[in-house]
Image (cartoon, rainbow, N blue to C red):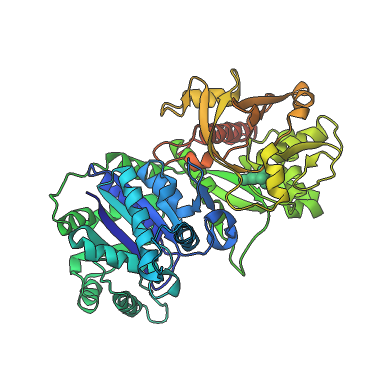
């Protein structure tokens, strides 16, 4: 029997509802339960693949190829498990399925009404996800905040579930408590209003997660308890933290795990968070700094540049760095600036490693290629992720093999040397404008080339990512290394370090005469977890550390790592 915990937001979004959901999931898993987590995203988009990454953040990809909200990445990182496609739904996906059923007369010719058909479909999806995971607990995060029209039908689904199984459904409200500087005290009123808005949908929170810059104090806990109709001990303090991975431990300080079990009428169970505590100790003890540059196109919304668009890359860098007791300083550099002013490339000397992440379209591409050339020639560790691998191939074709004007047909359809071209099945999809959910998505096998740096990196990893030289990694792309150029490029020293065995697609490129120059057609960051950093990210960080040490000793600087 599955118990459901719905997590909704109050006052404003972006305050860590996803991480809260992931943290509660982690707490329950650490008590020996089977736990899964699902995300409900109120957008009309059928999946997150067509959403704007600047507004919505990263598109995370699951093993089974679902393009979903970045919070699914948080669930995977906190639970240390793969989350399947059933655990993500949008308004668009739910309506699409209800309309499909209606067209197939699956409602038996009845009039189909929004209520109950839509909430019913939501409930069925949550039940399917729970069954698949054989979950004792399913966390369900509802996107947005209570009081928005967009998520009313999802709250309605939650209400219907509570009515049907009152003992097995709980509600958590993650709410923000501002501390306005001119007042200098934490204000509870916005949260009181959020609870009222939630009450208006027929729901009462069992827990309030009190997000704020600081911990909530006793008088305010009492106030929320009285005004919001929750027990004082069910107001859980959630101050800002330096690392999100501290949050499950903070929640347990307020006994959240015990309280959840108590409300479900379950026996308390012992929590084993030893590995998680080690992780947090490692994070806090990582005193040495390292500079990692991510070179990408410039993007911002108004005055705010959003790091969320590459959250998995950022987390993967951190996971690998913490394993070396390093705190990475990750800096976003605007590739377009190098196009106007190549002198600016020298700023890259200040970094121990350079990443060009995934991307689409022509903007900033030439600047990224210049940065890759700089990293290759100056022996700065370089890690290319998807587009970063394709652009490294172009750079090598142009500047090492003399293939003038080499390019990807994504940027220049008329290029004389199309070293990156659409995969066969993609040509017609692109022509017919079938864009939604049609990229090469999810996990595919890759056979590693013996003797390659990548093979060595994976071989070191003991968590079973590699079996007999074959790995499985997640993809999200339409274009691919053009095998017609394989011979020309490899003759000049490009190493094909991994291939998809079924279709002979190039999945990893490397350079031998370089401390670390690796490009992957897949996104290794999607499989990096704090308790098991990704082997290629680890190898990248280790190479960056070696370079840093070498540069320091050349400059006569000693760094004891303290
Ligand atoms: N735009 C490239 C492609 O579609 C790379 C995609 C990516 O970086 N995820 O193949």
* Residue 247 visible in rendering: no
Residue 280's place in the image compared with 6, above or below, is: above
373 relative position to 323: left or right? right
In front: 388, or 498?
498
Which residue is the extreme one toward the front?
A: 109
95 relative position to 235: left or right? right
In front: 171, or 304?
171
| Residue 292: quarter of image | top right
| Residue 217: quarter of image | bottom left
In front: 546, or 528?
528
- Where in the figure is residue 371, as x and y percent of width and height? 72, 43
291 relative position to 179: left or right? right
In front: 124, or 78?
124
* Residue 380 visible in rendering: yes
Residue 72's place in the image compared with 191, above or below, is: above
Residue at (46% x, 35% y) in the render: 324
- Where in the figure is residue 335, as x and y percent of width and height? 71, 51
- How many labels, in total? 0
- Where in the figure is residue 268, as x and y percent of width and height? 14, 49
Residue at (34% x, 77% y) in the render: 197
260 relative position to 180: left or right? left
- Where in the figure is residue 81, as x and y percent of width and height? 38, 41
The C terminus, quarter of image: top left
Residue at (34% x, 76% y) in the render: 194
Residue 90's place in the image compared with 487, above or below, is: below
Q: Quadrant of ligand 1?
A: top right
């Amino acid at each position: 029997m599955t118990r459901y915990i719905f997590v909704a937001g109050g006052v404003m979004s972006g305050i860590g509802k996803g991480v809260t959901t992931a943290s509660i999931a982690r707490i329950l898993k650490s008590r020996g339960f089977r736990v899964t987590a699902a995300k409900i995203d109120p957008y009309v988009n059928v999946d997150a693949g067509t959403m704007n990454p600047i507004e919505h953040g990263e598109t995370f990809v699951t093993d089974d190829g679902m393009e979903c909200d970045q919070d699914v990445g948080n669930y995977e990182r906190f639970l240390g498990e793969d989350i399947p496609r059933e655990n993500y739904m949008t308004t668009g996906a739910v309506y699409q399925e209800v309309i499909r059923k209606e067209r197939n007369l699956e409602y038996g010719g009845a009039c189909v009404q929004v209520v109950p058909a839509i909430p019913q479909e939501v409930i069925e999806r949550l039940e399917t996800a729970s069954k698949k995971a054989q979950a004792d607990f399913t966390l369900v995060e509802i996107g947005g905040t209570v009081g928005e029209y967009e998520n009313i039908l999802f709250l309605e689904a939650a209400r219907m579930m509570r009515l049907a199984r009152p003992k097995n459904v709980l509600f958590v409200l993650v709410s923000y408590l501002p501390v306005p500087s001119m007042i200098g005290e934490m204000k509870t009123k916005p949260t009181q209003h959020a609870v009222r808005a939630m009450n208006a949908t027929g729901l009462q929170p069992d827990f309030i997660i009190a997000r704020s810059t600081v911990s909530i104090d006793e008088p305010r806990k009492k106030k929320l308890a009285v005004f919001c109709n929750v027990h004082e001990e069910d107001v859980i303090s959630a101050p800002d933290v330096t690392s999100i991975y501290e949050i499950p431990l903070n929640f347990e300080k307020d006994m959240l795990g015990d309280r959840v079990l108590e409300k479900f009428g379950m026996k308390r169970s012992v929590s084993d968070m030893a590995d998680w505590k080690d992780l947090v100790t490692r994070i806090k003890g990582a005193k040495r700094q390292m500079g990692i540059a991510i070179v990408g196109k410039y993007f911002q919304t108004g005055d705010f540049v959003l790091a969320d668009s590459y959250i998995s890359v950022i987390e993967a860098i951190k996971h690998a760095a913490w394993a070396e007791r390093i705190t990475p300083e990750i800096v976003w550099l605007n590739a377009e600036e190098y196009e106007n002013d190549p002198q600016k490339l020298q700023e890259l000397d200040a970094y121990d490693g350079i990443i060009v992440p995934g991307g689409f379209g022509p903007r900033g591409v030439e600047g990224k290629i210049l940065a890759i050339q700089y990293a290759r020639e100056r022996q700065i560790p370089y890690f290319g992720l998807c587009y970063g691998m394709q652009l490294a191939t172009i750079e090598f074709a142009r500047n090492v093999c003399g293939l003038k004007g080499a390019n990807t047909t994504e940027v220049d359809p008329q290029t004389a040397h199309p070293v990156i071209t659409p995969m066969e099945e993609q040509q017609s999809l692109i022509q017919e404008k079938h864009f939604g959910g049609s990229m090469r998505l999810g996990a595919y096998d890759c056979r590693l080339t013996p003797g390659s740096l990548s093979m060595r990196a994976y071989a070191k990893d003991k968590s079973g990512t590699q079996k007999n030289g074959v790995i499985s990694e997640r993809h999200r792309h339409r274009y691919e290394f053009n095998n017609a150029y394989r011979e020309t490029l490899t003759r000049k020293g490009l190493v094909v370090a991994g291939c998809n065995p079924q279709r002979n697609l190039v999945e990893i490129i490397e350079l031998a005469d370089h401390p670390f120059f690796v490009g992957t057609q897949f996104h290794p960051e999607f499989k990096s977890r704090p308790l098991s950093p990704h082997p290629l990210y680890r190898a990248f960080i280790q190479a960056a550390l070696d370079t840093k040490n070498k540069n320091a000793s050349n400059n006569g600087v000693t760094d004891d790592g303290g």
